[in-house]
Image: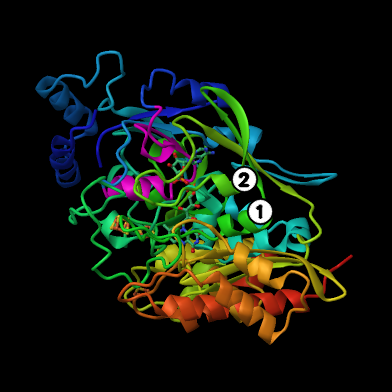
């Protein structure tokens, strides 16, 4: 059965310490008995291979780790942002097999065997920006920039899905990305610039 | 979030088999210790909030192949439960022949969430009642049976006016369920005690005295598909959703309407309401009020009045009665005016 309190303190511990998940799990095993003997220990870290931006990453993660936390805290890819952690803002948007999803509501363990693309994987290897990244710069489509990685990932998907054919269409299909700085009109302009370039490219 | 065991199921039988040693058939599936994980947009959200507390999570996304197909059969549509909301919303044949389904899904959540969420998980999404989602409130009969209901005398602007009880007034938040309700869908289930098919209308349960029991699914029962008959009213159908902001928001009031007309007289009307009720709400009184009539301002308004005759408002949500009526009235007029391909 559940025993919440240790789980909570441990989560804070995980979030605030630099210790590897492996040593955390060992600590746990020493400190407490498994809940039911027949079950595998849910505190055992999972050994996962995540394919991120074309590269396989071996990670050892607590099953509770979201894809967003795996990217930011374990793979060192801090481009994807945590705005709400509850699916309400879009700052954590990444691609999974080319489709935009929210990494804060995806367990890292579920992302195995899928291709993950983050904002870090959008530019070409020689550093040439993706047309959407360039368009965001050209149109000043941000102020503080916090929502921007999510906006750009979502915008690329919006174009690829064929939902960037008119201003209302863009606004509707970009509604999953909130911008506290309200850069919305410039974001629409950026997408209109990048859309035809993406089709050529 | 509390610790849990994570497994990925490779087929329906192995997913269901994980429930074999679970001894809690008396509770409804949404409260079981083991939870299936589809898109995770309800489950992971509520696990983070400590509202859902499974000790084991069975990832069923690998069942996409087996349970994710959209098929047109001679007498209807079969939607695999693992089809994503976006797949169904973007399907040209569904947009044309079952518009209410495509529209309800397209107007829900965001593009990202629609890519993630499976339609099986969608119909099992939980209420957005703030007191249910925030465990710092002790009183929530749905979350903690017998603890009371903080919403009755609290901030209840978003709460239901239909199907409420003195124990819970939480709104069923989804959109797609109303489309399935209006089109009289059937649900295919597979579970520890075998397969069965139930009417979609019997899936959700009104709160009554046990708001913690939300569905008629037993633990381990897996939704495998929804079947929708190619009824004459399916093509003349639509979904109208009214909300606080234009997009990426739950309904304050919504109407799923499907009409079969005989020279502009109603042969059959099918109506389901959302945003205003504790469960996907079939408005039978409104349907009856329309039968045999031509739909115009007067008859549509009369039907809408009938739909809300038994509404029970609280302090902050009385506006939903008028809003709900106007939403239904407009939906009926629009559906009657639709140009329907033959
Ligand atoms: C910010 C936000 C806005 C939203 N706005 C809307 C909106 O406007 N309209 C709307 O309708 N919805 C909205 N939603 C809700 C969203 O549509 C649902 O969360 C989603 O559809 C649930 O599907 P899922 O696959 O992610 O389910 P999951 O979270 O994976 O599962 C939900 C529940 O269903 C169970 N389950 C899943 N699949 C099956 C199956 N095949 N058989 C049996 N049990 C199963 C799980 O065990 C769990 O209990 C919103 C959500 C968020 C976060
Ligand atoms: S309305 Fe229902 S879900 Fe909300 S606090 Fe009351 S009992 Fe809980
Ligand atoms: S951080 Fe994922 S949607 Fe806000
Ligand atoms: S640029 Fe500041 S939140 Fe969007």
Q: Residue A122, can we see it?
A: no
Residue B77: numbered disc: none
- Render colour scheme: rainbow
**Residue A172 relative to residue B163: left or right:** right
Q: Is mark 1 within 8 Å of ligand 1?
A: no
Q: Which residue in the protein does label 2 denote?
A: B83
Of B61 and B70, which appears nearest the observer? B70
Return the chain for callout 1: B
x, y percentage for residue B151? 27, 64
For the residues labelled 2 and 1, say whether their Cβ atoms are less than 8 Å apart: yes
Mark 2 or 1, nearer chain start: 2
Tell me the quarter of the image containing the C terminus of chain A.
bottom right
Q: Secondary structure at mark 2?
A: loop
B34 in the magenta segment? yes
Of A184 and B33, which appears nearest the observer? B33
What residue do we see at 40% from left, 60% from top?
A: B164
* Residue B12 to residue A53: above or below: above
x, y percentage for residue B273? 55, 65
Q: Which residue in the protein does label 1 denote?
A: B88
Determine crowd level at label 2: few under 14, some 14-19, many 20+ residues with C-alpha closer than 10 A.
many
Return the chain for callout 2: B
Classify residue A85 by image quadrant.
bottom left
Classify residue A29 by image quadrant.
top left
* Residue A124 to residue B248: above or below: above
Residue interval drawn in magenta: B25-49
Q: Number of numbered discs present?
A: 2
Q: Residue furthest left?
A: A31
């Amino acid at each position: 059965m559940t025993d919440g309190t240790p789980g909570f303190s441990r989560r804070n511990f995980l979030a605030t310490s630099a210790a590897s998940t492996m040593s955390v799990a060992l600590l746990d095993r020493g400190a407490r008995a498994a809940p039911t003997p027949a079950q595998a220990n849910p505190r055992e870290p999972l050994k996962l291979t995540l394919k991120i931006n074309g590269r396989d990453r071996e990670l050892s993660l607590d099953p509770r780790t979201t894809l967003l936390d795996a990217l930011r805290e374990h793979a060192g890819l801090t481009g994807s942002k945590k705005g709400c952690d509850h699916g309400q803002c879009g700052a954590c948007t990444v691609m999974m097999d080319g489709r935009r999803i929210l990494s804060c509501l995806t367990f890292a363990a579920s992302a195995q065997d899928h291709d993950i693309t983050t904002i870090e994987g959008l530019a070409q290897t020689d550093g040439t920006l993706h047309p959407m990244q360039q368009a965001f710069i050209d149109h000043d489509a941000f102020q503080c920039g916090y929502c921007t990685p999510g906006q750009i990932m979502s915008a690329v998907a919006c174009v690829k899905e064929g939902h960037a054919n008119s201003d209302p269409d863009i606004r509707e299909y970009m509604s999953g990305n909130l911008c506290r700085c309200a850069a919305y009109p410039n974001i629409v302009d950026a997408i209109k610039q990048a859309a035809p370039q993406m089709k050529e490219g | 979030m509390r610790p849990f065991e994570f497994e990925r199921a490779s087929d329906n039988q192995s997913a269901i088999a994980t429930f074999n040693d679970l001894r809690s058939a008396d509770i409804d599936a949404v409260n079981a210790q083991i939870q299936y994980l589809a898109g995770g947009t309800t489950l992971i959200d509520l696990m983070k909030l400590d509202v859902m507390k499974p000790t084991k999570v069975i990832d069923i996304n690998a069942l996409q192949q087996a349970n994710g197909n959209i098929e047109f059969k001679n007498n209807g549509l079969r939607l695999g439960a693992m089809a994503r909301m976006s797949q169904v919303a973007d399907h040209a044949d569904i947009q044309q022949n079952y518009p209410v389904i495509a529209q309800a899904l397209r107007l829900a959540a965001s593009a990202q969430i629609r890519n993630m969420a499976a339609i099986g998980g969608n119909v099992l999404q939980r209420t957005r009642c703030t007191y249910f989602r925030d465990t710092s409130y002790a009183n929530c009969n749905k979350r903690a049976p017998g603890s009371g209901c903080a919403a009755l005398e609290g901030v209840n602007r978003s709460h239901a006016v239909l199907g409420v009880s003195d124990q819970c007034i939480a709104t069923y938040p989804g959109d797609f369920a109303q489309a399935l309700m209006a089109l009289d869908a059937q649900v295919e289930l597979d579970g520890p005690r075998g397969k069965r098919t139930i009417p979609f209308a019997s899936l959700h349960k009104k709160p009554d005295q046990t708001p913690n029991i939300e569905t008629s699914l037993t633990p381990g029962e897996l939704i495998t598909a929804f079947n929708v008959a190619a009824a004459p009213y399916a093509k003349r159908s639509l979904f109208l959703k009214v909300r606080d902001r234009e997009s990426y928001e739950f309904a304050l009031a919504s109407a799923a309407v499907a009409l079969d007309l005989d020279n502009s007289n109603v042969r059959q009307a099918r109506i389901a309401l959302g945003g205003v009720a504790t469960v996907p709400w079939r408005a039978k009184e409104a349907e009856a009020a329309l039968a045999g009539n031509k739909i115009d301002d007067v008859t549509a308004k009369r039907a809408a009045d009938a739909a809300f005759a038994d509404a029970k408002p609280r302090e902050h949500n009385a506006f939903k009665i008028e809003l709900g009526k106007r939403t239904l009235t407009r939906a009926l007029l629009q559906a009657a005016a639709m140009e329907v391909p033959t």
